[in-house]
Image (tube, rainbow, N blue to C red):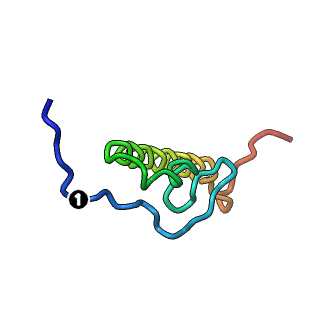
Amino acid sequence: MNQQFELFEIANPCIGLCRSNKKGYCFGCLRSRTERQLWHDMTTEQQREVLRLITKRKLRIEQIRQRKDQQLGFDFEEEIEMGELF
């Protein structure tokens, strides 16, 4: 099996917003505590896998936000016809 050589280092995904949620995921880069601690010791393949996981996490967060917007997206100014309730 041919092994491909890396010409460039994979950049650390840290964006300087280093704050974690209750589960230990960083709000800035979306890495877990372990992923952040071990980044410099990881192989290129492991770093690529972390980047893939970050992409999936971003997508999940966006989907949750969209669902929340849809659920909260009703118009309070809209007049609702009550009909024959009373």
Q: Residue at x 17, y 38 (%)?
A: 3
Q: Residue at x 55, y 68 (%)?
A: 17
Q: Residue at x 50, y 44 (%)?
A: 60
- Residue 47 or residue 61, whichever sits in front: 47
In the rendered image, which quarter is residue 84 located in? top right
For mark 1, give the secondary structure. Answer: loop
- Image height of 42 relative to 84, above or below: below
Question: Which residue type does callout 1 highlight?
Answer: Phe
- Image height of 86 relative to 31, above or below: above
- Residue 65 or residue 57, whichever sits in front: 57
Q: Residue at x 40, y 47 (%)?
A: 42
- Residue 84 or residue 41, whichever sits in front: 41
Q: Judge left or right: residue 40 versus residue 3.
A: right
Which residue is at the far front? Answer: 41
**Coordinates of residue 67 in the picture (x, y in percent):** 56, 46
Q: Quadrant of the N terminus?
A: top left
Q: Judge left or right: residue 1 versus residue 23.
A: left
Q: Quadrant of the C terminus?
A: top right
Which residue is at the far right? Answer: 86
**Coordinates of residue 72 in the picture (x, y in percent):** 64, 52
- Residue 55 or residue 9, whichever sits in front: 9
**Coordinates of residue 79 in the picture (x, y in percent):** 68, 56
- Image height of 69 relative to 77, above or below: above
Residue identifier under label 1: 8
Q: Judge left or right: residue 21 versus residue 1.
A: right
Q: Judge left or right: residue 82 versus residue 68.
A: right
In the rendered image, which quarter is residue 49 located in? top left
**Coordinates of residue 70 in the picture (x, y in percent):** 56, 49
